[in-house]
């Protein structure tokens, strides 16, 4: 089973993906995190993608698809995984279908309007040392500018600047939003209201996932 998290930047895909990983044991694969790590380590991949990311544009399909393919082929992904930030356009949708085509897919689209996205991303902070995310709106760090875990400095992500947020939203509406229609026609699409507290959003997600997993296990049982 592959769970695909859709939704605009800042809708909570990372947070909810982390919670799914914790509860259901499906590893969360965030292409954004994989790229940010590569940038931080100054690897050849990191050097290739850094400026594109800082502009809020999409990294080229061939690069992203290769990164995802390699990650999905790892052993911990055998039973399933959560994709956060991939696919982001129709070409990536088709490329994903060719990687392990036997795996069933389900889409969880975390819906949030542009105004809420801008408000959230402007208040988002990450630890410059360990990467743990915080949000000033939620007041979820003990100190305003220090990580609770490692005492690293809390900073804004380079691509959370107002002009770049605008560009990321433009790219989202133009390139990623058409996937909603595509997946709806496939009958594997589920919408989740991204407003409200993290726990409430996760409750909706858990409800959908529990139902889906039950169906999958019933089908597997019937076939065996
Ligand atoms: P995210 O953390 O998911 O918002 O991703 C941060 C940035 O990484 C994006 O703005 C893109 O530049 C790049 N990125 C992440 N995932 C993809 C993808 N599937 N396709 C192209 N670029 C991506």
Image: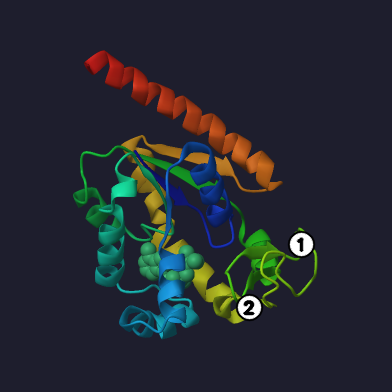
Q: Residue at 26%, 39% (x, y): give it.
A: 103
Residue 208: % across, % down: 51, 32
Q: Which of the pair 18/200 is nearer the observer?
A: 18
Residue 218: % across, % down: 35, 18
Asked if one can make out residue 171 in the rendered structure from this viewpoint, the answer is no
Residue 86: % across, % down: 38, 58
Dot 1 beta carbon under 8 Å from ligand 1: no
The disc, 2 or 1, on the residue closer to the chain's N-terminal end is 1
CA neighbours of label 1 inside 10 A, class few (<14), some (14 to 19), many (20+): few
Q: Which mark is residue 162?
A: 2
Compared to residue 199, the image places residue 213 above or below, namely above
Please give the residue where the numbered disc 1 appears in the rendered image: 137
Question: Distance between the Cα atoms at labels 2 and 1?
Answer: 16 Å
Quadrant (top left, top right, bottom left, bottom right) of the C terminus: top left
CA neighbours of label 2 inside 10 A, class few (<14), some (14 to 19), many (20+): few
Q: Quadrant of residue 152?
A: bottom right
How are the colours assigned in the image?
rainbow
- Determine whether label 2 and label 1 are within 8 Å by CB: no
Q: Is residue 139 left or right of residue 222?
A: right
Q: Is residue 23 left or right of residue 58?
A: right
Q: Residue at 67%, 47% (x, y): give it.
A: 198
Q: Residue at 38%, 52% (x, y): give it.
A: 179
Residue 19: % across, % down: 56, 45
Dot 2 beta carbon under 8 Å from ligand 1: no
Quadrant (top left, top right, bottom left, bottom right) of the N terminus: top left
Q: Quadrant of residue 63?
A: bottom left
Q: Nearer the viewer, mark 2 or mark 1?
A: 1
Q: Secondary structure at mark 1?
A: loop
Q: Secondary structure at mark 2?
A: helix
Q: Is residue 157 left or right of residue 100?
A: right
Q: Residue at 60%, 40% (x, y): give it.
A: 202
């Amino acid at each position: 089973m592959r769970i695909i998290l859709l939704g605009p930047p800042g809708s909570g895909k990372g947070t909810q993906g982390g919670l799914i990983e914790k509860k259901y044991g499906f590893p969360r694969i965030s292409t954004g995190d994989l790229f940010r790590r590569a940038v931080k380590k100054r690897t050849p991949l990191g050097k290739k993608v850094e400026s594109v990311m800082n502009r809020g544009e999409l990294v080229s399909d061939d690069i992203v698809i290769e990164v995802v393919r390699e990650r999905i082929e790892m052993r911990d992904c055998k039973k399933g995984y959560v994709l956060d930030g991939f696919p982001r356009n129709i070409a990536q949708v088709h490329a994903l279908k060719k990687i392990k085509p036997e795996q069933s897919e389900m889409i969880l689209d975390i819906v949030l309007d542009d105004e809420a996205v801008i408000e959230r991303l402007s208040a988002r902070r990450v630890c410059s040392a360990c990467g743990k995310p915080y949000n000033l709106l939620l007041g979820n760090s003990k100190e305003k500018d220090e990580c609770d875990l490692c005492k690293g400095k809390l900073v804004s992500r380079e691509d959370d600047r107002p002009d770049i947020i605008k560009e990321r939203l433009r790219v989202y509406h133009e390139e990623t939003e058409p996937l909603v229609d595509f997946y709806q026609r496939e009958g594997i699409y589920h919408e989740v209201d991204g407003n409200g507290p993290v726990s409430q959003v996760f409750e909706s997600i858990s409800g959908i996932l529990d139902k889906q997993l039950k169906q999958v296990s019933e089908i597997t049982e019937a076939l065996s």
